[in-house]
Image (cartoon, rainbow, N blue to C red):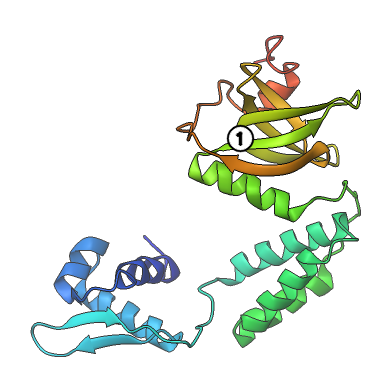
Amino acid sequence: MDSPTSRSLDLLALLQTGREWSVQDLSTRLQVSERTVRRDAMRLRDMGYDVHSRPGPGAVYSLRPGLKIPPLLLGVDEVSTIISSLLILEAWLPDDTTAATARTKLEQVLPGSLRRRAAAVALSTQVLRETPTSVDWELVGTIVDAIATGSRLSFQYTDRRGHPTQRTVEPHRHLLRERKWYLVAFDLDRDDWRLFRLEAMRTAATSPGPHGRRAFPWASIEDWLTSDFGRRPTAR
């Protein structure tokens, strides 16, 4: 059975389309009773969303746009997970204040009970520092946008011998490995999957020619890495 939070998110997604929904339509789309629809709509109102309803047999619901930002739809376990993850980044990237700033902003918009949980997690958690190299978050943003939109990525790359090259790739994932950040991508010029160090990438930009999300040919990135980049079989 879906949790109240999950149901509320599904209801909110429908209301954010901007149209009016009858209780019956919402009940059918969400596969819940009409009573549950009304209860979840009330829950959204309690959280600050301006859910408008027209009473009567033909009752409809709609979401009025507003400037008020309601509390986040997060449970205590989800808050614990997010805060712990940010604490790991804070410990691993001591010279980068992004994670600490994000945690502070998150705590400011949480309801009281969740804010207390976030503070308790921060107080009780100790992360051993395994500092990776610093990362250019603007570069990470360019990479994730390219992956999300199925776009190619072009950038200047300096190999381990110090030779600069221009590369055009179909990006797959960026990852942290042995304290360094990498990009896994299909190199179009070399017709092969390659691993690129983010610290060696410059002037990255998406380029025309969506690649339609080329399938990664190994079961996982771990399999690819342990097989010496596909050169030898992995243990099964």
Q: Residue at x 71, y 49 (%)?
A: 139
Total marks drawn? 1
Residue furthest to the left in view is: 57
Q: Quadrant of the C terminus?
A: top right
Tell me if 108 is positioned left or right of 88 in this view: left
Up-down relation of residue 37 to residue 234 (above or below): below
Quarter-wise, where is residue 115 in the image? Answer: bottom right
Dot 1, crowdedness within 10 Å: few (<14), some or many (≥20)? many
From the top left corner, tell me how far across and down residue 210 is, in percent: 48, 35
What residue does disc 1 label? 171
Residue furthest to the top in view is: 232
Element marked by disc 1:
strand
At label 1, the amino acid type is Pro
Tell me if 42 is positioned left or right of 214 in this view: left
Quarter-wise, where is residue 207 in the image? Answer: top right
Q: Quadrant of the N terminus?
A: bottom left
Quarter-wise, where is residue 98 in the image? Answer: bottom right
Up-down relation of residue 18 to residue 157 (above or below): below
Q: Residue at x 61, y 81 (%)?
A: 110
Q: Nearer the viewer, residue 9 or 121?
A: 9
Tell me if 80 is positioned left or right of 170 in this view: right
Q: Residue at x 23, y 78 (%)?
A: 35
From the top left corner, tell me how far across and down residue 46 is, in percent: 42, 88
Asked if one can make out residue 140 in the rendered structure from this viewpoint, the answer is yes
From the top left corner, tell me how far across and down residue 60 is, in percent: 18, 81
Q: Residue at x 70, y 37 (%)?
A: 155
Asked if one can make out residue 31 in the rendered structure from this viewpoint, the answer is no
